[in-house]
Amino acid sequence: MQKMIFVNLPVKDLAAATRFYEAIGCVKNEQFSDHQASSMAWSDSIVFHLLTREYFATFTPRPVADARQATGMLIALSCDSREAVDAITEAAARAGGTADIRAPQDHGFMYSRAFADPDGHVFEPLWMNPDATFE
């Protein structure tokens, strides 16, 4: 079986969050989506499960964090080019997210930016030169 990553994210407005994730290139899987959740495929092996805050709370005995107030994780997304990094960041801003929550980072062999979704979850799209050597 292929290894996969399922990232479960609490969201305030499921419909708005679903539109946002579609705008950054995810595809909704209707089979695993309903009025409490949207299953959004980023790739064949990475899926974001957007869960209403109330539904998310049923999976944990701990309080549900507000990603606008604190950062619990940073989600890095590999991109095929610098242009793809820029495109997804700009799409995020157009779809209700916040682009460049920190300064873009350009190290020559690696380029990244950062954006937050409407609920404050932080993403770092990045491109790395596959021909770069590290010593």
Image (tube, grey):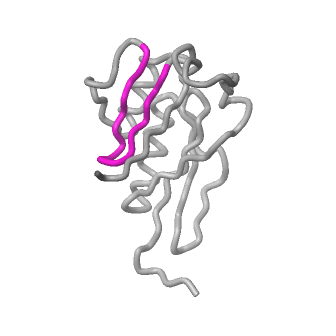
In the image, residue 125 lies at what x, y percent? 49, 52
In the image, residue 54 lies at what x, y percent? 56, 13
Q: Residue at x 54, y 58 (%)?
A: 112
Residue 45 lies within the magenta run = yes
Asked if residue 46 lies left or right of residue 90, the reply is left
Q: Residue at x 47, y 52 (%)?
A: 77
Q: Residue at x 40, y 25 (%)?
A: 18
Q: Quarter-wise, where is residue 32 in the image? A: top left
Q: Quarter-wise, where is residue 46 in the image? A: top left
Asked if residue 108 lies left or right of residue 6, the reply is right
In the image, residue 108 lies at what x, y percent? 54, 74
In the image, residue 44 lies at what x, y percent? 29, 47
Q: Residue at x 41, y 20 (%)?
A: 37
Q: Quarter-wise, where is residue 59 in the image? A: top right
Count of number-bearing discs: 0
Residue 88 lies within the magenta run = no
Q: Over which residues does the magenta segment extend?
A: 36-51
